[in-house]
């Protein structure tokens, strides 16, 4: 039996973004830009490159800019047309989503990532689904979600993107307990949210890219509180292990944690150096500061 196709993605955007206050007081964190594109656009583009067709944003108060971003802006488009700005117009049209392919649900209270995913349960239904946390950016040759989708085809089970983190930082991340490891795919035998370094089962950490089986929703619906008294996605994912295949993927590419100031600044540099229209100027001005 071949696995069901991966067609859906959940984009949790209901967090408060407290680490970026005051920038995030009236603007969603996911609208912050790296070079000239908002974080949410990178996430949607990455998912589309993996063949995903349907999107659900799990949103909260003050996040309407995210919905508007994917809408048609008639006045703007008419003005661009009038002024002959064909390139900018084509880019806008390419960036937005097909009518009816994006839906939103409200989380109402930020009770944790697991709770945010549970809020998308009707959208998810009985299909495997992707999760992309827009504040994690990955710079890679093949988009990270496309690499995960390929691994899902191979394993026909849940797959999470993983990176190695320094041992003394395991208490900041969801950490894997691992079985067989072929250097690319790692069998997951357990998952622990934010373990202290002395009890962490490995230094392989989950980043904000997942392909999960819909059964995770049953586990989330128990609303068990975990680390930080939040409903943790990691705890519900751990309950899938042993019932269906579960792997970590050491993906090709570099991940930037844009929910953190230093990670966000590093992403600006890395993404601008990857742009042929900007790399030369950026390299030149960087010399001034090093
Ligand atoms: P973070 O841990 O980065 O939290 O959430 P945050 O609120 O966005 O930012 P800080 O820590 O206050 O600065 C990781 C991802 O999970 C989503 C966030 O929107 C982000 O994409 N999230 C988190 C929710 O959607 N709901 C929650 O209850 C918690």
Image (cartoon, rainbow, N blue to C red):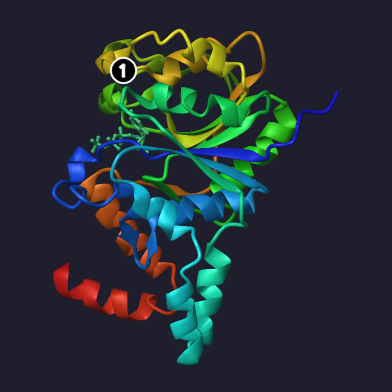
Q: Kindly identify the residue that appears in the image at 67 percent across and 15 percent down.
A: 244
> Tag 1, which secondary structure?
loop
Q: From the viewer's perspective, is residue 35 above or below residue 169?
A: below
Give the residue drawn at x 67%, y 35%: 151
The foreground one among 169 and 148 is: 148
Q: Is residue 122 among what the camera can see?
A: yes
Which residue is label 1 attached to? 230
Q: Quadrant of the N terminus?
A: top right
Question: Where is residue 87 shown, x and y percent of the image?
Answer: 52, 82
Residue 196 in sight here:
no
Q: Nearer the viewer, residue 78 or 8?
A: 78
Picture quadrant of residue 214: top right
**Quadrant placement of the C terminus:** bottom left
Q: x and y percent of residue 129 in the render?
A: 61, 32
Most extreme residue toward the bottom, as rendered? 83
Q: Is mark 1 within 8 Å of ligand 1?
A: yes
**Residue 186 versus residue 1: which sits nearer the camera?**
1
Residue 129 in the figure: left or right of residue 44: right
Q: Answer with left or right where residue 231 lies relative to residue 70.
A: left
Is 203 situated above or below 200?
Answer: below
- Quick check: 74 left or right of 146? left
User: Residue 211 location in percent, x, y?
Assistant: 59, 31
- The quarter of the rendering in which ligand 1 is drawn is top left
Say if 234 sits above or below 44 in the image.
Answer: above
Check disc 1: other Cα within 10 Å, few if <14, some if 14-19, many if 20+: some
Q: Position of residue 170 (x, y in %)?
A: 31, 24
Image quadrant in which you'd find residue 130? top right
Identity of the residue drawn at 18% across and 52% down = 23
Q: Which residue sits at x=23%, y=77%? A: 285
């Amino acid at each position: 039996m071949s696995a069901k196709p991966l067609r859906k993605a959940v984009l949790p955007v209901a967090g408060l973004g407290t680490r970026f206050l005051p920038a995030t007081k009236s603007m969603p964190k996911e609208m912050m830009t790296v070079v000239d594109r908002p974080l949410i656009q990178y996430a949607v583009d990455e998912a589309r490159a993996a063949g995903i067709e349907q999107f659900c944003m799990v949103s909260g108060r003050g996040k309407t800019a995210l919905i508007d971003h994917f809408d048609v802006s008639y006045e703007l488009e008419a003005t661009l047309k009038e002024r002959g700005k064909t390139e900018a117009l084509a880019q806008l049209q390419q960036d937005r989503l097909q009518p009816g392919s994006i839906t939103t649900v409200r989380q109402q209270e930020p009770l944790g990532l697991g709770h945010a995913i549970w809020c998308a349960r009707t959208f998810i239904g009985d299909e495997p689904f992707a999760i992309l946390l827009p504040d994690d950016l990955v710079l890679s040759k093949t988009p990270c979600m496309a690499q995960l989708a390929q691994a899902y085809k191979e394993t026909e089970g849940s797959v999470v993107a993983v990176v190695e983190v320094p041992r003394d930082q395991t208490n900041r991340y969801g950490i894997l307990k691992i079985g067989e490891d072929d250097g690319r795919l790692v069998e997951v035998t357990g998952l622990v949210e934010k373990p202290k370094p002395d009890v962490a089962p490995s230094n392989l950490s989950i980043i904000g890219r997942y392909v999960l089986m819909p059964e995770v929703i049953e586990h989330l619906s128990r609303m068990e509180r975990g680390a930080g008294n939040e409903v943790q996605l990691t705890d519900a994912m751990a309950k899938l292990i042993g019932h269906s295949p579960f792997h970590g993927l050491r993906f090709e590419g570099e991940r930037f944690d844009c929910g953190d100031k230093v990670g966000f600044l590093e992403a600006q540099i890395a993404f601008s150096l990857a742009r042929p229209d900007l790399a030369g100027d950026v390299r030149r001005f960087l010399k001034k500061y090093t």
